[in-house]
Amino acid sequence: MALLSEVVAYLDEQLDIAAIPDYPGALNGLQLANEGEIGRIVAAVDGSLAVVEAAAAAGGPGLLVVHHGMFWQGAQPVRGAFYRKLKTAMDAGLAIYSAHLPLDVHPEWGNNACLARAIGIHEWSPFLDYKGLAVGVRGAWQGTREELKQRLMLAVGGPVTVCAGGPERIASVGLVTGGAGSEVVRAAAAGVDAFISGEGPHWSFPLAEELGLNVFLAGHYATETFGVKALAAELARRYSLPWDFVDRPTGL
């Protein structure tokens, strides 16, 4: 068993929770406490009712680490699915910790860092700004458009949509996991040959063609499984706890 307070303090410090800006609904950090001890770590992308039910079913007090927490819709009445989610977690002694942008940008456990390593991007530098925070990475990558697609498909374990608007041979890649596909203008202005994200709006495809930019969309969910897994594995190692991943893909 480990003390929840110690684990949370470690996460808050390592992820720089207090300093990193984010969307109001992210509410990064400990979103739900338990009685104070945890005997297991569970990772998931979304703090949904289905995920909480699956995490609670394993039994025993634990910590559920998610990328998208429970409060994206802001303040809401505690009833219906939201009530069942909280009650299920509390009855099971399941604490819930959420890290959105702080986990995206972490240099070791972050979604961007993990995916960049998985597909072989090197010589990283900051990429795309949000309120003074670089939310992605850019770097060197040598190969063809089809080769990059195959590397991405292997990394995320699923399909990749490609807009072949740029050069066939790729030497530089910008990467922002999740839902950054609408940032094609800024990505093209940055001078990369290819821009990788999870999902984007319809209009981003023809616009990328006009801008001469290759765009690879590998799934919002699929590109954001990396960070919570890496973080859970680190916590399990540090505190000698078992860990598991609740896979609840959206297909988006």
Image: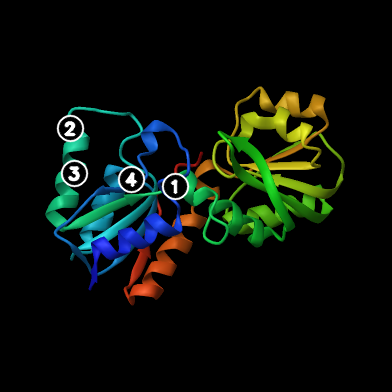
- The residue tagged 2 is 80
Q: Is residue 246 visible?
A: no
- The residue tagged 3 is 86
In the rendered view, how is the structure colored? rainbow
Amino acid type of the residue that numbered disc 3 sits on in the rendered structure: Leu
Q: Earlier in the sequence, mark 2 or mark 1?
A: 2
Q: Counting other residues with Cα less than 10 Å from the Cα at mark 2, is it few (<14), some (14-19), or many (20 or more)?
A: few
Q: Are marks 4 and 3 in contact (CB under 8 Å)?
A: no
- The residue tagged 4 is 47
Tell me the SS state at disc 2: helix
Say which of marks 2 and 1 sits in front: 2
Is 123 drawn above or below residue 202 in the view shown?
Answer: below
Q: Earlier in the sequence, mark 2 or mark 3?
A: 2
- The residue tagged 1 is 249
Amino acid type of the residue that numbered disc 1 sits on in the rendered structure: Pro
Tell me the SS state at disc 4: loop
